[in-house]
Amino acid sequence: MNHLNCDGFRTLISEALNDRGRLGQGLGRDGIAWHRHLVDCSACRSYLAAETRLDELLAMLPEPGLPPGLAESVQAALAPVRRQRQDDAVLEGLLDCVPKPDVPPDLSQRVLAGLQRERAPAEWTLLRGRGLGLTAAAAFFAALLLGWALVFQSSEVPRETAYFRDELAGEDELIVYALENWDLLMGEEVDVYLASLDPAEAAVLELDALGDFLSGSEAEGR
């Protein structure tokens, strides 16, 4: 090699470091071209000086004392990771082979419509609680009427009192509920709730109230 450019010069330095040990051990037949390029290129002279200092520092470091069997231990530790990656690759390949499901375009709307009641449990719990509260309030007033009749008119019980006494048979828990929730039953929340019902729910409550009224009227007629 008679002439070297910068790239060729630095390639020669890399070969000297990797294959021939330290730079001072000689360059063989490339030595003349090496020195000729150093005379002409100041940038490569600075590069050579830096590489020479680094090579000398590395030569001063002691040989690393690696424990025996280190490579085998590292490979054994990485074996589960390799197997997991292989399993993941196999699984991804299988999933790619599975055809995509044929989902109806309106499936999400149908599912949401079917779960509408379950998705609003608070509304239905409130409906049941308010219905029980209204029934408990009626039972409480009926119990007061029955107690008044038994205390002040023990000799003759009116037909209305007899009707309420029959209706309240076995309703001790309902009366206890009315006593414990008296403030709730007498508050304005019941009216607010009734005003918030949709027409279908309001119709159900009205039919229940009408049935109770007709039953009471029939009992009074008897």
Image: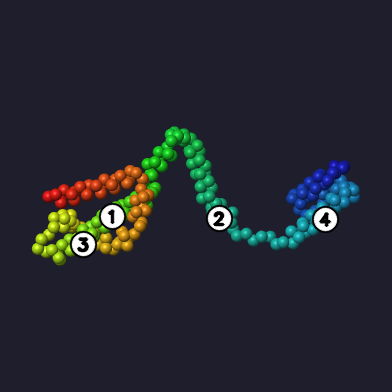
77 with respect to 19 (left or right) = left
How far apart, in angstroms, are the residues tagged by discs 1 and 3? 16 Å
Amino acid type, callout 2 = Ser
Please state which amino acid type lies under the numbered disc 3.
Leu
Q: Report, in whole angstroms, how far the alpha carbon at label 2 lies from the one at label 4.
A: 40 Å
Residues packed near mark 1 inside 10 Å, few (<14), some (14 to 19) or many (20 plus): some
Q: Report whether residue 91 is seen.
A: yes
In the image, residue 76 above or below residue 147: above
Residue ranking furthest to the bottom:
151
Neighbour tally class for label 3: few under 14, some 14-19, many 20 plus, Cα within 10 Å: few
- Label 1 sits on a secondary structure element that is helix
| Residue 20 in sight | no
User: What residue is disc 3 on?
Assistant: 144
Please tell me how crowded label 2 is: few (under 14), some (14-19), or many (20+) other residues with Cα within 10 Å. Answer: few
Compute the Cα span from label 1 to label 2.
76 Å
In the image, which disc is placed on residue 49? Answer: 4
Which callout, 2 or 3, points at the residue further toward the start of the chain?
2
Residue type for callout 4: Ala
Which residue matches tag 1?
134
Q: Nearer the viewer, residue 49 or 70?
A: 49
Sequence-first disc among 4 and 1: 4
Give the mark, 1 or 3, whose residue is nearer the N terminus: 1
Check the picture and name the quadrant holding the N terminus.
Answer: top right
